[in-house]
Image: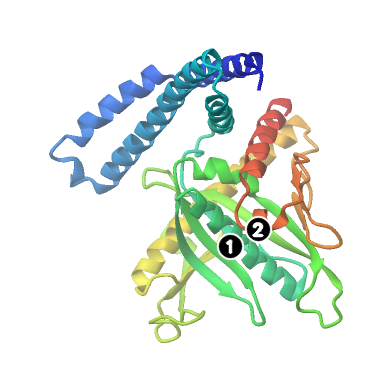
C-alpha cells in the first residue's frame, strides 16, 4: 500500500472518530460516570434494588463506551507512528501489519459510527425478540427455528446474554413460535431493524418429491421495559391461564402446571412463558413480555396516527423485508437496503452485522425523508 493511501485513510478515520466523539460528547460522558460512581459508593444504594441495577448498569455501559472510544483513538495514533517508522526503515513486514490494523480500525470505527445513529427513546435497552412461523407449513416452522438459531448465534458471537422465555414446538419439526431476550447495551436499537417478515426459498427437506418450497416467518422486536416505565395494566384487564410446560426433556416439563399464559383482554395480546420451574417466576417473566408488547403497540398506534396526518403512504415496507434463497442459487438479500451476500450459511450462522448496520443507516435516511 502506498504511503499516500495510509495518510489519506488515517486522516479520514481520524475525522470520523472526531465526529463520533463530538456526537457522544465525551466530557458529558465522563461527568455522568463521575456522578454514577458517587451513587455506587453510597452505602444505601441497594436499599432500592431496581434503582441500583439501573445505576450500575448505566455506569458499566458508559465506562465500556468511553474505553472503546479512547482505545480507538490511541490505536489510531499508534498506527500513524507505526506507518511512519515502517516507511522510514522500508520495513515491508511492519507496513503489512499496519495495513491489517488499518482494516480492523476501519471496521470498528464504522461500527461505532452506526451506534451514534441509535438515539431513540428505548434504543439502549435490552431486546425482546419474538419469532412466529407463517405460511409454508412444516418448512415455515423449520425456518422459524433457523431464525432463532441465527439470532442466538449472533448474540453468542458478541458475547451477549440470551434468555429464552417461551418456545412452542411444531408437531413434525421446527417451532410455531418463540420469545427470547438478548441482553446487551443497545440491543433493542440494534435489532429493531430486523423486525418484519423473512422469506425462505429452498428445496424442502420435508418434501419426498424434492420440490422447491417458499416459506415465511415473522420477527418482532420490542424493548425490555424497566419498572420506572409507565404502563397502566389493571389486574382486571389481564386473564391468567396456567398449563403444563411442553418441549424436549428437562425436569418439571409435562409434570406441573408451571407455564403461564397472559391475555390482555382489551387488545387481545397474548404472551406465555415456561422457562422457569416456578409458576410465579413464569408469571413475572410473562408480565415483562406483555408490558413490552403493549408499549410497542402503543408506539405503533402513535406512529400510524402521525403517518395519517402526514399523508404518508409508505408507513410499511411490505410483506417481506429479507429473502433467504438457498435454491436455485445462494443469496440473502435485504429488500430495503439492497444489501446482499452469497454466503448464506454464514448469515444463518449469525454473521448478520453487515445487514444490521445497513438497516440502521437505511432507517436513519428513511426517517429524515419522512
Give SS at disc 2.
Answer: helix
Q: Is residue 248 visible from the viewing direction of this image? A: yes
**In the drawing, what numbered circle is on residue 294?**
none
Where is the C terminus found, in terms of image quarters? Answer: top right
* Image position of 84 with respect to 162: above or below: above
Q: Which residue sits at x=60%, y=54%?
A: 350
Q: Is residue 162 left or right of residue 339?
A: left
Where does residue 311 sit, x and y in percent of width and height?
78, 33
Q: Is residue 119 visible from the viewing direction of this image? A: no
Give SS at disc 1.
Answer: helix
Q: Which residue sits at x=39%, y=28%?
A: 66
**Which residue lies under the disc numbered 2?**
348
Question: Which of the 4 image quarters holds residue 313?
Answer: top right
User: Closest to the observer: 288 or 216?
Assistant: 216
Where does residue 55 sit, x and y in percent of width and height?
30, 38
Where does residue 105 sit, x and y in percent of width and height?
54, 29
Number of disc labels: 2
The answer for how far apart the CA atoms under marks 2 and 1 are is: 8 Å
**Which residue lies under the disc numbered 1?**
149
Instruction: Using a 10 Å C-alpha cutoff, classify the residue at mark 1 as few (fewer than 14 neighbours), some (14 to 19) or many (20 or more).
Output: some
Please name the colour scheme applied to the rendered image: rainbow
Q: Are marks 2 and 1 in contact (CB under 8 Å)?
A: yes
Q: Which residue sits at x=74%, y=72%?
A: 139
Where does residue 13 sit, x and y in percent of width and height?
57, 20
Q: Is residue 89 left or right of residue 348?
A: left
Q: Earlier in the sequence, mark 2 or mark 1?
A: 1
Residue sitting farthest toward the bottom: 255
Amino acid at each position: 500500500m502506498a504511503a499516500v493511501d495510509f495518510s489519506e485513510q488515517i486522516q479520514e478515520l481520524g475525522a470520523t472518530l472526531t465526529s463520533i466523539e463530538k456526537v457522544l460528547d465525551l466530557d458529558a460522558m465522563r461527568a455522568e460516570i463521575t456522578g454514577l460512581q458517587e451513587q455506587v459508593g453510597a452505602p444505601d444504594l441497594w436499599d432500592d434494588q431496581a434503582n441500583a441495577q439501573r445505576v450500575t448498569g448505566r455506569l458499566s455501559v458508559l465506562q465500556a463506551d468511553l474505553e472503546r472510544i479512547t482505545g480507538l483513538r490511541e490505536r489510531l495514533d499508534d498506527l500513524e507512528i507505526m506507518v511512519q517508522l515502517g516507511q522510514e526503515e522500508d520495513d515491508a513486514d511492519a507496513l503489512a501489519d499496519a495495513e491489517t490494523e488499518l482494516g480492523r480500525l476501519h471496521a470498528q470505527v464504522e461500527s461505532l459510527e452506526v451506534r451514534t445513529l441509535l438515539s431513540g427513546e428505548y434504543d439502549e435497552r435490552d431486546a425482546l425478540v419474538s419469532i412466529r412461523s407463517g405460511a409454508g407449513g412444516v418448512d415455515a416452522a423449520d425456518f422459524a427455528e433457523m431464525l432463532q438459531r441465527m439470532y442466538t448465534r449472533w448474540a453468542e458471537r458478541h458475547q451477549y446474554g440470551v434468555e429464552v422465555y417461551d418456545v412452542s414446538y411444531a408437531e413434525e419439526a421446527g417451532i410455531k413460535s418463540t420469545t427470547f431476550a438478548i441482553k446487551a447495551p443497545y440491543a433493542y436499537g440494534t435489532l429493531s431493524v430486523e423486525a418484519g417478515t423473512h422469506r425462505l426459498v429452498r428445496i424442502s427437506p420435508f418434501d419426498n418429491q424434492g420440490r422447491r418450497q417458499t416459506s415465511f416467518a415473522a420477527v418482532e422486536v420490542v424493548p425490555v421495559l424497566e419498572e420506572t416505565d409507565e404502563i397502566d395494566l389493571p389486574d382486571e384487564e389481564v386473564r391468567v391461564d396456567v398449563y403444563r410446560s411442553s418441549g424436549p426433556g428437562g425436569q418439571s416439563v409435562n409434570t406441573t402446571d408451571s407455564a403461564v399464559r397472559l391475555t390482555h383482554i382489551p387488545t387481545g395480546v397474548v404472551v406465555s412463558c415456561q422457562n422457569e420451574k416456578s409458576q410465579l417466576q413464569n408469571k413475572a417473566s410473562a408480565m415483562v413480555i406483555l408490558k413490552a408488547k403493549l408499549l410497542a403497540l402503543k408506539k405503533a398506534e402513535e406512529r400510524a396516527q402521525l403517518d395519517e396526518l402526514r399523508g404518508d403512504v409508505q408507513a410499511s415496507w411490505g410483506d417481506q423485508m429479507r429473502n433467504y434463497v438457498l435454491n436455485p442459487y445462494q443469496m440473502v438479500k435485504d429488500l430495503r437496503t439492497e444489501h446482499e451476500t452469497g454466503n448464506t450459511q454464514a448469515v444463518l450462522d449469525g454473521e448478520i452485522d453487515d445487514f444490521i448496520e445497513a438497516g440502521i443507516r437505511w432507517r436513519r435516511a428513511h426517517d429524515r425523508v419522512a
